[in-house]
Amino acid sequence: MSSTPFFQAIADFLQWSFQFFDWVGDKFNWMLIGLGFFGLFYWLITQKKLSDKAAKDPNQLK
């Protein structure tokens, strides 16, 4: 009995499962870039609000 069909079946399954990455392509990269920019602008807006609030309050610890 040969083990070739067993390993051929594993190879076929792996080739089928890795086709997912062809479909995803650069979509994941663009999603991460978009998420990074969203987080950056969210933090910049939040930091501006906190800085303005701190500038108006003279009784704070620095």
Image: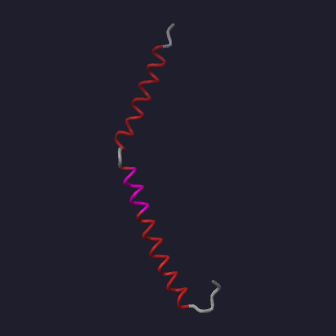
| Dominant secondary structure (helix, strand or loop) of the stretch shown in magenta | helix
Q: Viewer-proximal residue, 41 or 24?
A: 41
Q: Nearer the viewer, residue 49 or 13?
A: 49
Q: Is residue 30 magenta?
A: yes
Q: Residue furthest front?
A: 62
Examine the rendered structure and indicate whether residue 45 appears above or below residue 3: below
Give the image's coloring scheme.
Answer: secondary structure
User: For the view shown, which residue lies furthest in the right direction?
Assistant: 61
The residue drawn where x is 40% and y is 50% is 28
| Residue under the point 41% across and 64% down | 37
Q: Is residue 45 above or below residue 7?
A: below
Q: Position of residue 8 (x, y in %)?
A: 44, 19
Q: Position of residue 59 (x, y in %)?
A: 63, 91
Residue located at (37% from left, 44% from top): 24
Residue positioned 41% across, 34% down in the render? 18
Give residue 44's quadrant in the image. Answer: bottom left
Counting the numbered discs, the total is 0
Q: Position of residue 62 (x, y in %)?
A: 63, 83
Span of residues in magenta: 28-36
Residue 46 within the magenta-colored segment of the rendering: no
> In the image, residue 5 lies at what x, y percent?
45, 15
36 relative to 44, above or below = above
